[in-house]
C-alpha cells in the first residue's frame, strides 16, 4: 500500500449479515476513492476461523486527507450504513513504520 497515513477498522459483523456488510463496505470504499482527495487504496480482510470478524485498511496521502474525509457530509452516513451490520466497530489511525516490497 502506498501512503503516508493509514486507517484501520476492526469490525464484528452480525451473524447472517456478512455479505451485506461486504457490499456496503465496498460501496463506501469506492465512494471514498472517487470523492476523498488523498485516498489511495482500501482493503477489507476476513478472519479465516471467525467469519464475522473483518479488518479494513486504508492508505492515505496524509493525515490531513483522512481528517477532511471524516469531516465530509456523507462520511457519517456511509460509515453508518456499514456499522448497521455490526455488533462492534473500532477505528484506528496509523503512520508508516516500515515497508518491505512493492
Image (tube, rainbow, N blue to C red):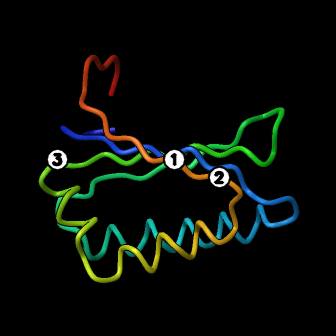
Disc 2 from disc 3: Cα separation: 24 Å
Report the mark closest to the observer, 2 or 3: 2
Above or below, comparing residue 76 to residue 10 in the picture: below
SS at circle 2: strand
Residue that label 3 marks: 63
Dots 2, 1 in contact, CB < 8 A: yes
Mark 3 or mark 2, which is nearer the start of the sequence? 3
Residue 47 vs residue 73, the one in the foreground: 73
* Image label count: 3
Dots 2, 3 in contact, CB < 8 A: no
Q: Residues within 10 Å of mark 1 (few under 14, many from 20)?
A: few
SS at circle 1: strand
Could you say where residue 78 lies in the image, as x and y percent from the top left?
A: 46, 76
Residue 90 is left or right of residue 30, and the answer is right
Mark on residue 88? 2
Could you say where residue 41 lies in the image, as x and y percent from the top left?
A: 36, 52
Identify the residue shown where x is 34% and y is 21%.
101
Identify the residue shown where x is 71% and y is 44%.
53
Identify the residue shown where x is 33% and y is 17%.
100
Could you say where residue 21 lies in the image, as x and y percent from the top left?
A: 68, 66
Residue that label 1 marks: 90
Amino acid at each position: 500500500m502506498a501512503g503516508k497515513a493509514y486507517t484501520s477498522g476492526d469490525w464484528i459483523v452480525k451473524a447472517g449479515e456478512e455479505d451485506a456488510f461486504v457490499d456496503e463496505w465496498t460501496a463506501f470504499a469506492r465512494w471514498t476513492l472517487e470523492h476523498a482527495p488523498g485516498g489511495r487504496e482500501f482493503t477489507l480482510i476476513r478472519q479465516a476461523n471467525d467469519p464475522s470478524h473483518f479488518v479494513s485498511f486504508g492508505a492515505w496521502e496524509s493525515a490531513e486527507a483522512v481528517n477532511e474525509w471524516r469531516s465530509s457530509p456523507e462520511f457519517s452516513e456511509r460509515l453508518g450504513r456499514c456499522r448497521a451490520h455490526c455488533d462492534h466497530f473500532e477505528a484506528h489511525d496509523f503512520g508508516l513504520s516500515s515497508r518491505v516490497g512493492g
